[in-house]
Amino acid sequence: SNPSLLILPGDGIGPEVMAEVRKIIDWFGAKRGLAFDVEEDLVGGAAYDRHGTPLADETMARAQEVDAVLLGAVGGPKYDDLDFSVKPERGLLRLRKEMDLFANLRPAVCFDALADFSSLKREVVAGLDIIIVRELTSGIYFGEPRGIFEEGNERVGINTQRYTESEIDRVARAAFELARKRGNKVCSMEKANVMESGILWREVVQKVHDEDYPDVELSHMYADNGAMQLVRNPKQFDVIVTDNLFGDILSDAAAMLTGSLGMLPSASLGAPMENGRPKALYEPVHGSAPDIAGQGKANPIACILSFAMALRYSFDQGGEADRLEAAVNKVLADGVRTADLLAQEGVEPVSTAQMGDAILA
Ligand code: NAI
Ligand code: MG
């Protein structure tokens, strides 16, 4: 039977960019003999509008069964005043938590045609190809206690950074495995100088390395220095592994090395399923972009490259992923630009659909 794919377009520009991915999925079925069983469902505000919850139980159940989930984006001003428990983001957090997607892969690749578009100098970013592995299911976004509490005559806001050895162990393994398929180099980032969780993080990563991955080059760096080094000389890195909070921030900084949020894919991987494939959710890094939603301006490349990652990491189709990435590279080299990629005046931007069509062609 065909590999199965659950598509959750979500809100804002999510459905717009996902429509371009659908064209590409259909193309692979028609032209490359690579057919998928595709189902589509609601997530985020769209699911809240229909079901009163940002992720219906049936959708959650399907996400656990399919070979991979592809998500657009969630959220928007319409939902800003909703209770925290039903906010669109909760739909995404629930997917990540219940699928136990502990390793978030965020590549920062600088396509040559866009090197001048980066916030940094061409020589700093040209040829850049790094990947940040962010721990995604634990740490300060989930640790207890959390809340706003009365303390004496004022309130105190509390979040807790908490990591178990096994949580660090498994994400470290994911990073070392990945490094072996790339530049064979891992840099682990924490703040062991001021955080207990950082001390444990460094210890466990080093132990996993020494026991099972001595062939991979490992270094440790304080995350604040890491932020500086990412901007100063990003090409010194290959794979960066870090916790949930630092990974959130560092990967957004890395995003700007390559130009536009509209270019950045991501993958979130969990433990292997019975068929050997890891549980997996693929999504662009960007959000629902309410400022441009509904205008046909969104860049579909981040979502398209997320599907390329699905081809590579869920479906063992590295060659087809290369083909798709090469098409993106070609279109950029030809000067085709959505509005977010326009550095100079006088060039006409193409629409979301025109970009998708150019890549297909
Ligand atoms: P955003 O990523 O939606 O937008 C930031 C800026 O980048 C905007 O100016 C937007 O127009 C631009 N941009 C983003 N993606 C683009 C694309 N594909 N093509 C062209 N331009 C693009 O982040 P923002 O504005 O902070 O959040 C908007 C909404 O999205 C909020 O409700 C937020 O909670 C949600 N969000 C959802 C995420 C997700 O679904 N994973 C991630 C981040 C934010
Ligand atoms: Mg972020």
Image (spheres, grey):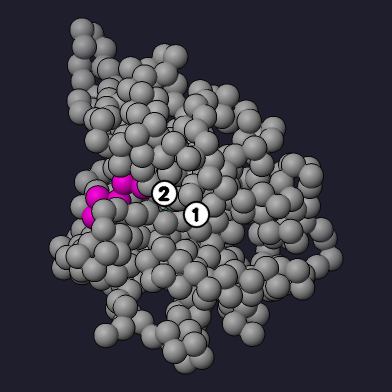
* Residue depicted at x 34% and y 34%: 211
Determine the secondary structure under disc 2.
Answer: helix
The percent coordinates of residue 123 (x first, y second) are 79, 44
Q: Residue furthest right?
A: 346
Q: Residue at x 31, y 46 (%)?
A: 102
- Please report the residue visible at 54 percent of the width from the left and 41 percent of the height from the top: 185
Q: Which corner quadrant holds the N terminus?
A: bottom left
Asked whether, in this view, residue 86 is left or right of residue 233, the answer is: left
Instruction: Describe residue 271's horizontal placement relative to residue 342 as left or right.
Output: left
Tell me, yes or no, if residue 135 can be seen here: no
Q: Which residue is mark 2?
A: 177
Amino acid type shown at disc 2: Glu
Image coordinates of residue 4 in percent, x first then y, are 30, 76
| Residues tagged 2 and 1 counted as in contact (Cβ below 8 A) | yes
In the image, the segment drawn in magenta is 99-103
Q: Position of residue 331 (x, y in %)?
A: 70, 73
Give the overall secondary structure of the magenta segment: loop
Given residues 30 and 352, the one toward you in this image is: 30
Q: CA distance from mark 2 to mark 1?
A: 7 Å
- As for residue 255 lying within the magenta part, the answer is no
The residue labelled by disc 1 is: 181
- Closer to us: 84 or 5: 5
**Amino acid identity at mark 1:** Lys
